[in-house]
Image (tube, rainbow, N blue to C red):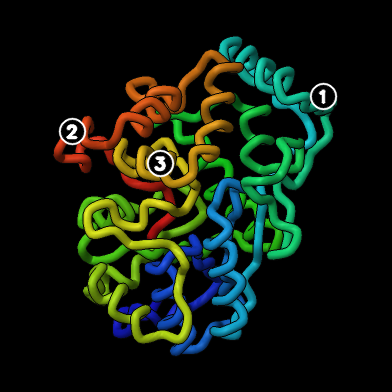
C-alpha cells in the first residue's frame, strides 16, 4: 500500500471482499488506481449468506469489470481431535445430518475449493458435505463468541491457503474497515504473527459509513439489503450470525421465520450453543412476542462481525 494514497495497493496482496457495501466501496477506489496482477480479490462464501449478497458480489464483478475469486471451505478427511468434547460434538452433528467423511491416514488436502456464482453454496441447499458451514460443523463442532471457528476457518484460513497455493510467502491483507470503527481499526493495526500484514485503506482515508451510503445512492446498482438506521444492514452477511445483536437476529426471524430452523437444529442435535446467553430457540421465541422485550440499547449484545461488513 502506498503511504501517499491508501487505495494504491501494491502486491502481493489479497483484498478481503465480504460482499457488503463498505468493502465494495473500497474495491471501487482500489480499481480506480489500477489493480496490480498480483493483487487478488477474494470472496469467501460460507453458504449462509443472503442470496442478495451473492447477487451483489456477482454484479460487482461484472459492473466494475474485476475478477473476483469465489472460495469455499472444503474438507474431506476428519482431523486428529485433541479435545474429546469437540470430537463428540462434531460426531453428533455428522450423525444428525447424515454426513460422511474419511480418516486422513496421512493424506493432505487443499482445505478449500474455488467455485462460481452459479455453483456457490446457498442457504437453501441441503446440508451435505459440500456445504462449507455444514462441513465445518461436522469437522470442528459449534463456533461461539470466544472460539470464532467460522471466521477463522471459513474465511481467514481459506484466504491464507489460497495465497500459499499461488506460491506467495508473504502478502498484504486489505480489509474494508472504516475510520468510524476505531476499535476494529486499532485491532487491525496490529498485524498478526502470520505471513501477512493488514491494511485498512478506508480508515486511512477517513471514510465513514455516511460516505459509503451516499456513494451507493449515486451508483446505478446497489446491495439489495435494507440499511436500518438503528440496526444497520442486519440481513447480511450470514443470515443469523451468532455474533449479531439480539435485535438483528430477532428482526431477521420475524421477516423470515424459516431462517432460524437450521441454527436451532444444530444447537439441538449437538447439545451446544453458538451463543449460550441467547440460544436460537430463545431468538425464535422473542421473534414471536416482538422485539420490544429486548434491551433498549441493542448494541450491547452486538459482538460485531468477523471479516464481514455491511
Q: Image quadrant of residue 109?
A: top right
Pick out the residue farthest to the left: 296
Q: Position of residue 24 (x, y in %)?
A: 45, 72
- Cβ atoms under marks 1 and 2 closer than 8 Å: no
What residue is disc 1 on?
103
**What residue is drawn where x is 45% and y is 35%?**
148
Q: Nearer the viewer, mark 1 or mark 3?
A: 3
Camera-side residue of 209 and 88: 209
The reply, left or right, for residue 238 in relation to residue 176 is: right
The reply, left or right, for residue 271 in relation to residue 105 is: left
Quote the CA–CA distance across marks 3 and 2: 17 Å
**What residue is drawn where x is 79% and y is 38%?**
108
Q: Nearer the viewer, mark 1 or mark 2?
A: 2
Quote the CA–CA distance across marks 1 and 3: 41 Å
Camera-side residue of 249 and 309: 249
- Near mark 3 (Cα within 10 A), the count class, few <14, some 14-19 or many ≥20, is many
**What residue is drawn where x is 37% and y is 68%?**
22
- Near mark 2 (Cα within 10 A), the count class, few <14, some 14-19 or many ≥20, is few
Give the mark nearest the N terminus, 3 or 2.
Answer: 3
Give the mark nearest the N terminus, 1 or 2.
Answer: 1
- Cβ atoms under marks 1 and 3 closer than 8 Å: no
Q: Secondary structure at mark 2?
A: loop
Pick out the residue farthest to the front: 289
Q: Which numbered dot is residue 136?
A: none
What residue is disc 2 on?
295
Height in image: 174 above or below 91? below
The reply, left or right, for residue 153 in relation to residue 73 is: left
What residue is disc 3 on?
254
- Near mark 1 (Cα within 10 A), the count class, few <14, some 14-19 or many ≥20, is few
Q: Position of residue 155 (x, y in %)?
A: 55, 49
- Cβ atoms under marks 3 and 2 closer than 8 Å: no
Amino acid at each position: 500500500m502506498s503511504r501517499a494514497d491508501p487505495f494504491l495497493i501494491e502486491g502481493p496482496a489479497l483484498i478481503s471482499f465480504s460482499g457488503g457495501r463498505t468493502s465494495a466501496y473500497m474495491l471501487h477506489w482500489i480499481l480506480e488506481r489500477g489493480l496490480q496482477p498480483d493483487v487478488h480479490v477474494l470472496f469467501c462464501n460460507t453458504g449462509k449468506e443472503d442470496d442478495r449478497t451473492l447477487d451483489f458480489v456477482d454484479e460487482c464483478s461484472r459492473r466494475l469489470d474485476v475478477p473476483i475469486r469465489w472460495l469455499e471451505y472444503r474438507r474431506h478427511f476428519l482431523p486428529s481431535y485433541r479435545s474429546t468434547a469437540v470430537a463428540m460434538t462434531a460426531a453428533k452433528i455428522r450423525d444428525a445430518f447424515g454426513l460422511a467423511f474419511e480418516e486422513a491416514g496421512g493424506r493432505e488436502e487443499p482445505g478449500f475449493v474455488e467455485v462460481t456464482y452459479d455453483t456457490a453454496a446457498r442457504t437453501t441447499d441441503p446440508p451435505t458435505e459440500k456445504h462449507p458451514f455444514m462441513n465445518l460443523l461436522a469437522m470442528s463442532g459449534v463456533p461461539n463468541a470466544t472460539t470464532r471457528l467460522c471466521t477463522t476457518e471459513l474465511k481467514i484460513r481459506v484466504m491464507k491457503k489460497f495465497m500459499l497455493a499461488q506460491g506467495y510467502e508473504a502478502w498484504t491483507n486489505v480489509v474494508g474497515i472504516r475510520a468510524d470503527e476505531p476499535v476494529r481499526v486499532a485491532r487491525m493495526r496490529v498485524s498478526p504473527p502470520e505471513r501477512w500484514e493488514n491494511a485498512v485503506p478506508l480508515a486511512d482515508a477517513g471514510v465513514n459509513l455516511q460516505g459509503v451510503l451516499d456513494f451507493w445512492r449515486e451508483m446505478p446498482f446497489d446491495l439489495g439489503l435494507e440499511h436500518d438506521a438503528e440496526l444497520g444492514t442486519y440481513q447480511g452477511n450470514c443470515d443469523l450470525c451468532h455474533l449479531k445483536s439480539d435485535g438483528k437476529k430477532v428482526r431477521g426471524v420475524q421477516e423470515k421465520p424459516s431462517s432460524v430452523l437450521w441454527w436451532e437444529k444444530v444447537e439441538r442435535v449437538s447439545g451446544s450453543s453458538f451463543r449460550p446467553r441467547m440460544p436460537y430457540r430463545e431468538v425464535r421465541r422473542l421473534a414471536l412476542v416482538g422485539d420490544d422485550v429486548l434491551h433498549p440499547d441493542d448494541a450491547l449484545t452486538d459482538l460485531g462481525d468477523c471479516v464481514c461488513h455491511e
